[in-house]
Image (tube, rainbow, N blue to C red):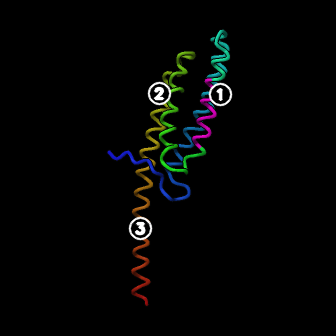
Amino acid sequence: MDLDLTPSPRPHGGQRMISATVLVLEAFVVFFAVLVAHQLVPGDRVLTWTWGLLTAFGLLACGGLLKRGAWPYWLGLALQLPVILLGLQVSAMWVIGIGFALMYAYGVVKGHQMDAEKDAVDAKVRAGWAEQDNAGD
């Protein structure tokens, strides 16, 4: 399996749209999980808020950086770990974090595959147009 996550040059590629959507939704879930952890673990409120807000802002920033190359996709994968580890304070986040990690990974891989297929079709269409233009001259 090829793990080249370099995004397609198309302006609104499927890989970027799916991945950004998952990251933004995940940031909201992390924020609400921090609110829950605030009440469940009153002794660790500073740690909870610091960890949660840094993770949420990291997810939002990563979603905005996805058009800059392959590294934001890898950063998004790395940011799944603190989301899953939020399960140390809110036990439901183990399942939710793993679910979001799987959705993100699936979106990155399948979105990349969709964009590659669309780029191949676009190249064939452009080649056909070039052939018609040359035949018409």
Nearest to viewer (mark 1 / mark 3): 1
Q: Residue at x 43, y 50 (%)?
A: 112
- Between the C-alphas of marks 1 and 3, the distance is 43 Å
The residue wearing badge 3 is: 123
Mark 1: few/some/many CA within 10 Å (<14, 14-19, 20+)? some
Where is residue 60 shown, x and y percent of the image? 62, 38
Where is residue 17 shown, x and y percent of the image? 54, 48
Nearest to viewer (mark 1 / mark 2): 1
The residue wearing badge 1 is: 53
Q: Which mark is residue 36?
A: none
Query: Left of 105 or right of it: where is 56?
Result: right
Outermost residue to the left? 1
| Residue nearer the viewer, 46 or 24 | 46
Q: Is 80 above or below relative to 120?
A: above
First reached walking from the N terminus: tag 3 or tag 2: 2
Q: Which mark is residue 98?
A: 2
- Between the C-alphas of marks 3 and 2, the distance is 37 Å
| Residue nearer the viewer, 89 or 68 | 68
Q: Is 93 above or below relative to 69?
A: above
Count all numbered tags in the image, as a single digit: 3
Mark 3: few/some/many CA within 10 Å (<14, 14-19, 20+)? few
Where is residue 58 shown, x and y percent of the image? 60, 35
| Residues shaded magenta | 51-63
The answer to which quarter of the image holds residue 49 is top right
